[in-house]
Image: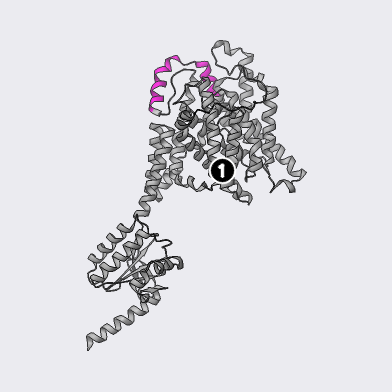
């Protein structure tokens, strides 16, 4: 806050106030809807909205980010806590609050120890596949509220569809009609009047309709009594055994919520011309989640939709979040009795419309055209999440990302270079049919650093290439892309040089970075190979090579 508050101006205050009130009116129905999605009472969504909105401006670096309940985290809460307690019980609420504290502590510690890079293990194809599948699961989880039928929840799409199908004969047509009308009205307002608080308008109209026509007595399920007043401070009971069981879901939510927040924060920071600090964002989110847990809320994150509305409404600083919190606070103090006749179907409609934008159809097509390995990763993450649930989807998708990283390190691109006739230009032989290979010389370019994971592949590639070009007398490795060499790779290079020497082949290097040359010198590899076997440029090597060829030719002539 100290970076922007000293220069804060009245004209900025007006813009922030308008944006904050706009997003606040949007968050009231969204927060309640997402709490219902998490299996919690709707009021918990407002509790989870209030305190984080006050804490984040003190520590966050984004000027537009709107924190609070989001669909993805709500789904993960339902997935993780639902394995330990039944929805609607006191134990379930206690565990959700405890989970918020655990997520907050994990994020705070990650920020302090600068571990924000861990989110990079979830590659973009994995995120897209997981998000699209999770959106479908979220949407289906709300269908029971639209149909007003009751069946055990699940994170597995086939089980949800089966259970829904078995209950179709019991659906309540009036409730379904209200839900469908709300969905169409939300979509219409989103397209034709995007600046309007569509969710709030739909909530008001449907609530008045249910109250005026007494629809609750005709079987339409309503929210009912909502507690008045601000949330009270309190800590949940700490049970180490339960906390140990919740560590996997807490880490999952910590990473996912940070990923959501930093992605949207960076997007709007780039538009506005400023930067965000990922590790500071972790600290801010951690403290916000901790605050949510201390005041009866559940885990929160940065919202894509509300942040977009916040920016569009003219938010200039985090002060907008304060006005957002003020709107929520006044609602909790004054307006909660008006929520009694709010139909649960409208909350389901809000969730369904909100998650439609998470289903990305264009990205799989783009990846299929550009890079099929990434396309397969996306499809894997999508179906794993769809049929095994969000929790297993995140875990297995992250493992898949890690396996892909290891695969790419273990099997780097190695190009055999050829020369463009009449020049000193060298390129990949496979990419240009006009290039020619220089007799007796193999020129390698390794497009990766050398680690223990890829030294075996390098040795095999060298042996395979030498077998294909049996006239080889010189092997040149272009090291311009080698940034690091670990000790295992150094040992392998000693072995490679000795094997080549025994076969009558001389090993040379060109284009090595200073840091790599220093490692070679300290390890003794430079002396082992000989100082004359290292060149700054390929052109320098070629001059020596041409001289050597000319000398050899003259000796043969004599």
The residue sitting at the top extreme is 217
Is residue 176 one of those drawn in magenta?
yes
Image quadrant assignment for residue 282 = top right
**Kind of element beneath mark 1:** helix
Q: From the viewer's perspective, is residue 138 above or below residue 399?
A: above
Q: From the viewer's perspective, is residue 439 above or below residue 283?
A: below
Nearest the viewer among 34 and 19 is: 34
Q: In this view, does 496 lie to the left or right of 55?
A: left
Residue 142 visible somewhere in the drawing: yes
Residue 264 visible somewhere in the drawing: no
Quarter holding the C terminus? bottom left
Image quadrant assignment for residue 432 = bottom left
Q: Residue at x 56, y 25 (%)?
A: 347
- The magenta stretch is 158-181
Nearest the viewer among 330 and 181 is: 330
Main secondary structure type of the part rendered in magenta: helix
Q: Mark 1 points at which residue?
A: 282
Q: Where is residue 14 in the image (x, y as percent from the top left)?
A: 74, 40
């Amino acid at each position: 806050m100290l970076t922007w508050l000293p220069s804060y101006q009245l004209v900025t205050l007006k813009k922030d106030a308008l944006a904050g009130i706009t997003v606040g009116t949007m968050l009231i129905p969204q927060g309640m809807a997402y709490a219902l999605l998490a299996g919690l009472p709707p009021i918990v969504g407002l509790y989870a909205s209030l305190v984080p909105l006050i804490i984040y401006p003190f520590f966050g670096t984004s000027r537009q980010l709107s924190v609070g309940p989001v669909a993805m985290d709500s789904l993960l809460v339902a997935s993780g806590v639902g394995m330990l307690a039944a929805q609607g019980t006191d134990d379930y609420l206690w565990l959700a609050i405890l989970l918020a504290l655990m997520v907050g502590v994990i994020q705070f510690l990650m920020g302090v120890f600068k571990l924000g890079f861990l989110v990079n293990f979830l590659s973009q194809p994995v995120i897209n596949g997981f998000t699209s599948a999770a959106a479908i699961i979220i949407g289906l989880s709300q269908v029971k509220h639209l149909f007003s039928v009751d069946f055990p929840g699940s994170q597995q799409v086939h089980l949800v569809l089966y259970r829904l199908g078995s209950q179709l004969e019991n659906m309540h047509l009036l409730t379904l009609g209200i839900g469908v009308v709300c969905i169409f009205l939300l979509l219409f307002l989103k397209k034709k009047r995007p600046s309007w608080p569509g969710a709030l308008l739909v909530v008001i109209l449907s609530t008045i309709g249910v109250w005026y026509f007494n629809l609750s007595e005709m079987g339409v399920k309503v929210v009912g009594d909502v507690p008045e007043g601000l949330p009270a401070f309190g800590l949940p009971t700490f049970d180490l055994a339960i906390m140990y069981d919740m560590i996997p879901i807490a880490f999952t939510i910590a990473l996912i919520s940070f990923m959501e927040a930093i992605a949207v924060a960076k997007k709007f920071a780039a538009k506005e011309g400023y930067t965000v600090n990922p590790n500071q964002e972790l600290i801010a989110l951690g403290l916000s989640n901790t605050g949510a847990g201390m005041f009866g809320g559940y885990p929160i994150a940065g919202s894509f939709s509300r942040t977009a509305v916040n920016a569009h409404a003219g938010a200039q600083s985090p002060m907008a979040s304060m006005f957002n919190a003020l709107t929520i606070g006044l609602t909790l103090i004054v307006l909660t009795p008006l929520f009694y006749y709010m139909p649960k179907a409208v909350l389901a409609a809000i969730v369904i419309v909100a998650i439609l934008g998470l289903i990305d159809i264009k990205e799989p097509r783009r990846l299929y055209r550009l890079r099929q390995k990434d396309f397969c990763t996306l499809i894997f993450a999508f179906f794993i999440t769809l049929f095994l649930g969000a929790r297993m989807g995140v875990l297995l998708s992250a493992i898949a990302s890690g396996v892909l990283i290891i695969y790419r390190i273990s099997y780097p691109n190695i190009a055999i270079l050829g020369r463009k006739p009449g020049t000193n230009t060298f390129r990949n032989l496979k990419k240009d049919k006009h290039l020619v290979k220089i007799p007796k010389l193999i020129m390698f370019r390794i497009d990766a650093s050398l680690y223990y994971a890829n030294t075996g592949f390098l040795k095999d590639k060298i042996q395979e290439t030498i077998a294909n070009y049996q006239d080889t007398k010189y092997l040149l490795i272009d090291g311009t892309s080698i940034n690091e060499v670990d000790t295992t790779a150094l040992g392998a290079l000693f072995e490679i040089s000795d094997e080549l020497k025994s076969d009558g082949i001389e090993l040379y290097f060109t284009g090595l970075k200073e840091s790599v040359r220093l490692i070679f010198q300290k390890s003794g590899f430079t002396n082992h190979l000989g100082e004359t076997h290292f060149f700054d440029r390929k052109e320098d090597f070629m001059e020596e090579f041409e001289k050597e060829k000319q000398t050899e030719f003259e000796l043969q002539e004599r």
